[in-house]
Amino acid sequence: MCAWIVTRPGEQLDEEEVREFCRGQIAHYKIPRYVRFVDELPMTVTGKVQKFVMRAQMIDELKLAEAKTA
């Protein structure tokens, strides 16, 4: 699982702070293994996040195999 995070200007955040926050908020298996800080998320013309683009970039970046689904 991967989290893409857009930080506010002037704010600092690291991966461990994100994981520590998640530990008290969500189930342990949902805590992101990978954390990526970006300036902006890939969006469609209508303003929706393009999750398939994010997924493809992370597969390439981390040299992972795409999971097969039913």
Image: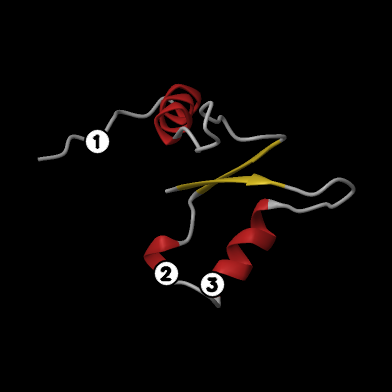
Looking at the image, is 52 positioned above or below residue 6?
above
Q: Residue 28 carries which label?
A: 2
Q: Who's the residue at 50% across and 25% down the image?
A: 61
Q: Who's the residue at 90% across and 48% down the image?
A: 10
Would you call the spot at circle 2 few (<14 residues within 10 Å), some (14-19), or many (20 or more)?
Answer: few
Q: Name the quarter where the C terminus is drawn.
A: top left
Q: Which mark is residue 23?
A: 3
Q: Who's the residue at 72% across and 52% down the image?
A: 14
Tell me whether circle 2 and circle 1 mark residues in contact (CB < 8 Å). no
Q: Residue 67 carries which label?
A: 1
Q: Is mark 1 on a helix, strand or loop?
A: loop
Would you call the spot at circle 3 few (<14 residues within 10 Å), some (14-19), or many (20 or more)?
Answer: some
Query: Is residue 9 left or right of 5 when viewed as pictured?
Result: right
First in sequence, mark 2 or 3: give its number: 3
Task: Report how far apart the C-alphas of labels 3 and 1 lie in the structure.
Answer: 25 Å
Q: Is mark 3 on a helix, strand or loop?
A: helix
Q: Residue furthest front?
A: 46
Would you call the spot at circle 1 few (<14 residues within 10 Å), some (14-19), or many (20 or more)?
Answer: few
Q: Who's the residue at 42% across and 32% down the image?
A: 55
Looking at the image, is 17 positioned above or below residue 45?
below
First in sequence, mark 3 or 1: give its number: 3
First in sequence, mark 2 or 1: give its number: 2
Query: Is residue 46 left or right of 20 when viewed as pictured?
Result: left
Disc 2 residue type (three-letter): His
Instruction: Using the image as rendered, state which of residue 50 and residue 64 is in the foreground.
Output: 50
